[in-house]
Amino acid sequence: MSLAGRECNAVVGAGPGLLLAKPQTYMNRSGYAARCLVERHGMEPRDVLVVYDDVALPLGRLRLRPGGSPGGHRGMESVLTELGSGEVPRLRLGIAPVEPPADLLRFVLEPFSGEEDDEVAAMVVHAAEACEAWLVDGSEATMNRFNG
């Protein structure tokens, strides 16, 4: 499936029972796209899996949760605010380096170093597997399998 369509200020792709979306807004305004797509496609917030990078987790670590607070992540805060619910499943992908960066903003906007490429590639594959498991098995089973 390719992300070839455009809808609700997001690049989208669809398949049977699945809608993938990559908001094209600033990260801290990504909730607009989520709300628009949820309303347009008649979904519930609990049917949305938000996948995002998180500097609060070590590089390569995955953490799935069925809901909760945004944990200081502005993008997730935007999604929860726009959807009016904390019951939005999320898959966090850890990007934190071993040594805390001096300039966090600069760190999150820079590409990964060449030394991290293999670990990042493995994390992306693992995250895709977690997304598929969430679709088939739901949050609880997926958390038991993928939360390290």
Image (cartoon, helix red, strand yellow):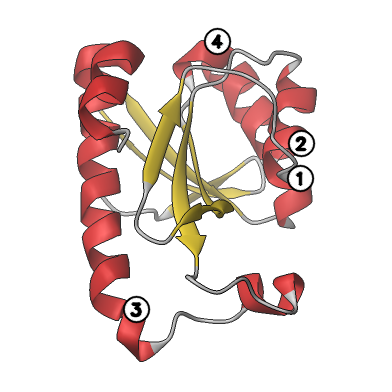
Relative to 138, is 133 above or below? below
Q: Which amino acid does the dot numbered 3 rest on?
A: Glu
Give the x, y percent position of residue 32: 74, 36
Residue 114 image position (x, y, % from top left): 35, 89
Residue that mark 4 sits on: 44
* Front: mark 1 or 3: 3
Residue 35 in view of the camera: yes
Q: Secondary structure at mark 4?
A: loop
Disc 2: CA contacts within 10 A as few (<14), some (14-19) or many (>=20):
many
**Amino acid at circle 4:** Glu
Disc 3 from disc 4: Cα separation: 36 Å
N-terminal of the two: label 3 or label 4?
A: 4
Disc 3 designates what residue?
116
Spatial separation of the CA atoms under disc 1 and disc 3: 25 Å
Q: Residue at x 52, y 19 (%)?
A: 41
- Mark 1 sits on what residue? 74
Q: Which residue position holds label 2?
A: 78
Q: Secondary structure at mark 2?
A: helix
Identify residue type, mark 2: Ser
Calculate the distance from the C-alpha at mark 4 to the C-alpha at mark 2.
16 Å
Q: Nearer the viewer, residue 115 or 75?
A: 115
The answer to which of marks 1 and 3 sits earlier in the sequence is 1
Residue at left offset 71%, top offset 79%: 106
Closer-to-camera residue (18/117): 117
Q: How many numbered discs, if any?
A: 4
Question: Are the two marked residues, 1 and 4, in contact with CB atoms closer than 8 angstroms?
Answer: no
At 29% from the left edge and 46% from the top edge, which residue is drawn? 127
Q: Can you say whether 51 is above or below 104 in the image?
A: above
Which marked residue is nearer to the observer: mark 1 or mark 4? 1
Q: Can you see residue 43?
A: no
| Tag 3 and tag 4, C-beta contact below 8 Å | no
Front of the two marks 2 and 3: 3
